[in-house]
Amino acid sequence: MTKAVLDGANPRVELAGSVRYARNAVFRGAYKLIARPGTQVALTLKDDQGSPADVTSVVALIHFGDGALAVAHSTVTSKFYLYWLTDGLDNWYNISKVLQNTLTPAPIGVLWSSIATPEKVLIAEGLGVAYLAHNDASNVFKTRKFDSTAGPPATLTDFQADLRGSGLEDTYFRGVVSFQQHLWGWGYGSQAAADNDRPELLRFGQPFFAAMKQGDSFAVGHRVRSQRERIMGAVVAGEVLYVGTRYSLWPITGFGRNSWDKSRPLDDSYGFAGPFAAAAARNGWLYYWSNRGPLRCEGISRPEPIFERLPTALAGVVNPQNVVVTYDPDFDQVIYLYQDQTSGRVSRLCAFDVLKDAFFGPDGDIGLGVRCASLVQPASLTGPAGSPIIVSTGVAGTLATANFTPGDRSAQATHRVEYRRTGTTPWTTASATIPNVPTGDIAFQITGLLSEVEYEWRVATTRNGQTSAYDGPEAASTFTTFDSGLAPPSNLAAEAFVENPSKGFYAFRITWTNSGEGGNSTEIHVKKQNPPGPPSGTLPLYTTVGPGVASVEYSMGNGIGHWWIEIRHVREGFLPSNYVGGPLHATLA
Amino acid sequence: MYVGEASGPRIIRYGVGVSQVGDPFQLEVRYWDAYPFGQDGEGVIRELVGFIRHTAGYNVDLVPIVDGVELSASRFSGGAPGGGLTEAIAECRAAVFRRCTRIGAILRTVQVLGETELVDVGYQPIVLRESP
């Protein structure tokens, strides 16, 4: 799948040259396989009780206008709630679009009531209006309409259309999507009993999200009203609206309602496993999860199965209708999330790197259960609101803590701390991605400093690729480190023993006494050389063992001769101890 | 990118920092087996050597897989690069000393401390009998 880098400076043999699997990894450049980034809590959604409590499930998230919309459900109140968020998901609006400046949004409205269980909710946007469809529609869950252009306050009403020539009536779609400035909906139709469940029917409205009318529809599939051909979802990728039933895929192409065409299915075997099982990736590619596993498609070419590349993952999937697929352009990965078979939690199943054309996965747990995922990008490319302000510097041995006040509190802002020896020119970047905090100061630790040296640091803020002016260096950001060498280990000894009698292989058992300082690791350096031995500090590193370990075995093969051993303690942020051993001379005759 | 929690109230931002809301995660890479002595050859693998590039320390396990059998993991850890360096490559040697035909390896982090990159995994073979 991928190839590891062979370090040209080391003479060893590269191992096989290929990776069987890589979990929690991303590619960064040729052959660079790096641990993926982590996660942070952005917002915590609340219900509408007098003393608001946490909701119990986040079921939908989508960018909307210059911000975002989220839908959540509470098993306590049995309601679905709508939330209006900023594009950075670091603040929220009330129904009048007034910023509320907390990280615990309250709902701007109730979508549906008296529903004990969460369900997927699909949202389409057009002309400042959001259309919200409950995926288990039946004739209970009306399609809702959130109009941000009304008011203030904005309005939340039932979405009505004339779908059977009897005037405006409530609608009951299972899903909605925007395609070529038209609103599309599928599943249930109007409130008339005969029109309630139309699993194969795809309706579309007038241009620019004008009214839906009776005759504007497509029926995908061949059988008409067959549950086997129920529309599961629809996704726009490139110039195509892909409509996935459970076992087929239909492309709708053309330029406007007079030329749309859906006559040729691309696939009659594999469709969409669920409403969130498909996503558009770069260059107009569609990636989706079928009943068989992942496939991809471009334009009106035949879908390409990619499920044969991850048999291990396929074996672990349960409830494929709950698979969530999304594309993350920041890491060039299509991300598949599924309910873990063992724990019942939702995990990151795997990621498909579209540049490397390779799967990474199956991955481990992403830490919590996931019901929906979405890319919410900034609506504008606003730069930092201001420069950060240096507060103070804390010094601890070869560490220093840079304390500063952010000049921009938005979640998109990150901070860059650079340092250098006072009086020198080049700056060293300690970190360019220090996360922001909504309140208080930031304390960032600069590591890897030399002892008893004067340094200075400066800080700037980056937001949407734009960087503020630096603050510093100044008196509060100038400091001198002090000596913090570790105490050395003691009682180093080496005892030879026969490791494999039949082969005549020998080994040393190297033992020592740790200094007692917590957190110290121990480096063991070994070299074979005739007397006189090598000078201290020149022996190659054999291994580093973690805190608390006080012995290690070193295999010598049939290495009869003179061996030299020395050890020292090491620990992050501290000078290593002196070597112990001198080096120690051990012979095997 | 953001994800919505299935059994809770939180919207989670993905792609930030090295820690994770909820359970931690680990980088894990497994290599296909190599046949350094040929498909039917035999020899001794003295040790596996993993190279890890890191910016803020490392804590990893290196697991030799000899003829399909996973051996005990060797654990390696170290602090942030010193001496003004912003990154370093750690050399992690796991003694193997097993007679075998094929050798594989799993390298996994025990804790992700900062940017962590797998640079390479190699081995030191002693040939006993080679096959074509």
Image: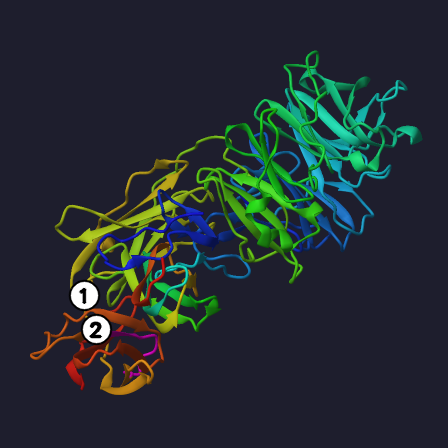
Direction right: furthest residue: A193
Direction left: furthest residue: A532
As rendered, which of A276 and B68 lies closer to the eye? B68
**Subunit of label 1:** A
User: Which of the 4 quarters of the picture holds residue A171?
Assistant: top right
User: Which of the 4 quarters of the picture holds residue A143?
Assistant: top right
As rendered, which of A251 and A198 lies closer to the eye? A251
As rendered, which of A63 and A18 lies closer to the eye? A18
Asked whether residue A517 is drawn in magenta, I would say: yes
Q: Is residue A419 left or right of residue B108?
A: left
Dot 2 or dot 1, earlier in sequence: 1
Q: Is residue B94 visible?
A: yes
SS at mark 2 in the image: loop
Q: Check whether the beta carbons of the residues at disc 2 and disc 1 lie within 8 A of each other.
A: yes
Q: Quadrant of the C terminus of chain A?
A: bottom left
Residue A490, position in %: x, y?
A: 23, 85
Residue receiving disc 1:
A451
Rendered residue at 36%/61% (across/down): B131
Asked whether residue A175 is drawn in magenta, I would say: no
**Subunit of label 2:** A
Q: Is residue B79 visible?
A: no
- Residue type for callout 1: Ser
Q: CA distance from mark 2 to mark 1?
A: 9 Å
The tag on residue A485 is 2
Direction front: furthest residue: B132
Rendered residue at 70%/41% (across/down): A274
Q: Find the magenta span and give its range.
A: A513-524
Q: Is residue B99 left or right of residue A378?
A: left
Badge 1: residue crowd in 10 Å (few <14, some 14–19, many ≥20): many
